[in-house]
Image: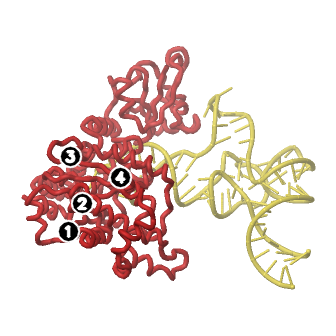
Chain colours: A red, B yellow
Amino acid sequence: MSLLSDLRWRGLIHQTTHDEGMDAWLAEKPRTVYAGFDPTASSLHVGSLMGLLMLRRFQKSGHRPIAVVGGATGMIGDPSGKSDERNLLSKEQLQENVEGLGKQMARFLDFEDQQNPALLVNNFDWTGHWTYLDFLRDIGKNFPVNVMLSKDSVKSRLGRGDDVGSAGMSYTEFSYMLLQAYDFVHLFDKYGCELQAGGSDQWGNITAGIDLARRMRSVQLYGLTWPLLTKTDGTKMGKTESGAVWLDAERTSPYQFYQYWINVDDADAGNCLRLLTELTHEEIELLDIARVNHPDKRDSQRRLAEELTRVIHSEAGLATAQKATEIFFGAEISDLSDAQLTEIFTDVPSKTVARARLSDEMFTIIEALVESGLAKSKGEARRTVEQGGAYVNNRRITGIDTQLTADHLASETVMVLRSGKKKYALLRFE
RNA sequence: GGGGAGUUACCGAAGCGGUCAAACGGGGCAGACUGUAAAUCUGCUGGCUCUGCCUUCGCAGGUUCGAAUCCUGCACUCCCCA
């Protein structure tokens, strides 16, 4: 099956510039394809997954992917899909973000491949040196304003001009598409890049690049967009109550990341499997059937979480996330090492307590709950125990007067306390 | 400037001399149920060295054997009239 028909089957094609000929064009020889990434944050998040995976799919089919971070365009702010003028980031902030993003991309793309290594570039490198006059002469000359005005990204903003509060767009943002269009031409010149992929909101910018290349170089370039990743309830994928789901383990631990996908709605699971994994069509269809017959097993979510966590946090990160899941959902904790526990409970608050208290003093479950912060007062701790909500190493503690001793340690120095179903805390005895 | 109403625990809101750590609702916490969802049901919900003691009812004083409840002053909020 060809790459393009696979993408179509998955629902990953929103629009292409050549619905008819692109398949054959891609089959003809390895092509170079690029997608852009917005450096407004120092880490990639779930929203960037589509682009990264798209490039990865192309690379696996033998094409050469180029990831472009928008060091220059990020300074301007892409108006596409935005209802308001964007705040500009400082150059230093952008530089930092660009570096952060590069590291994460290596998880998706192979930069070492002999045949078609991926490439990571920053568009500031070929945009930064332009002077305003030169840019207007050489690039701006090729942009008819009437065409620019007809782009959706511009129209939707201008239409809002008479609304109170959110007025129009600045000249800066209006110029954004020139920069992105020039990126495409530059990448064609330097790397022979002939295809640009992007989210459906990038259509206008992509076609602007194709037009520019036709005018400046008399070549025909290609473009395709993928649909926006949304949930059936209309909300954005990758958002939780506590904020975005990041691809950086420092911001979103592998466990949290894994859990996010485990909790995907049944209604969204099939779509996610298609859009975000590389599972075969057969396997996805089997999961569809399983989801209808045994929704409670949640095989789809499990598989989705597994695939994505593996790509982003590697096999080891996946193992940690799964072990943590097992433990967070009730498995008794014993015979683990400090290191293992620390890894599993990265998201959990911990407190250090003098080891002597385990042997010399009376250290009761009540004190432990208060000490760890799980209970605000001894009264609250007492209540929790009385109601059967107190656990040490996931084993329920029933007696209010229960003494904790070295026997209650889950590892060399750590004890795992839990209040209720999900609230955990660690006590380290040193 | 004049007149009136109010200020109670995390929030809303009862209580108007002892039986008030203070009804009720929401929230929160725990338990049961469950697919790590939602709903539902049950219990708890000031602190402590816990059959008792301590601190809470805008703030400061006072009356009384005894005050969240009565009196005085102060602060803030709201409403009405100018």
Q: Which chain letter matches label 4?
A: A
Q: Disc 2 marks which residue?
A: A188
Amino acid marked by disc 1: Val
Residue A122's disc is: 4
Residue A117's disc is: 3
Q: Which numbered disc flags the more N-terminal residue, 2 or 1?
A: 2
Mark 3–mark 1 distance (CA, rounded to whole Å): 24 Å
Does A425 sit left or right of A120 as displayed? Answer: right
Amino acid marked by disc 3: Pro
Q: Secondary structure beneath disc 2?
A: helix
Where in the figure is residue A268, as x and y percent of width and height? Answer: 26, 60
Q: Disc 1 marks which residue?
A: A219
Mark 2–mark 3 distance (CA, rounded to whole Å): 17 Å
Q: Residue shown at 59%/37% (left/top)?
A: A377
Outermost top residue: A360
Labels 2 & 1 near each other (Cβ < 8 A): yes
Q: Residue shown at 51%/32% (left/top)?
A: A372
Q: Which numbered disc flags the more N-terminal residue, 3 or 1?
A: 3
- Same-subunit check for callouts 2 and 1: yes
Labels 2 & 4 near each other (Cβ < 8 A): no
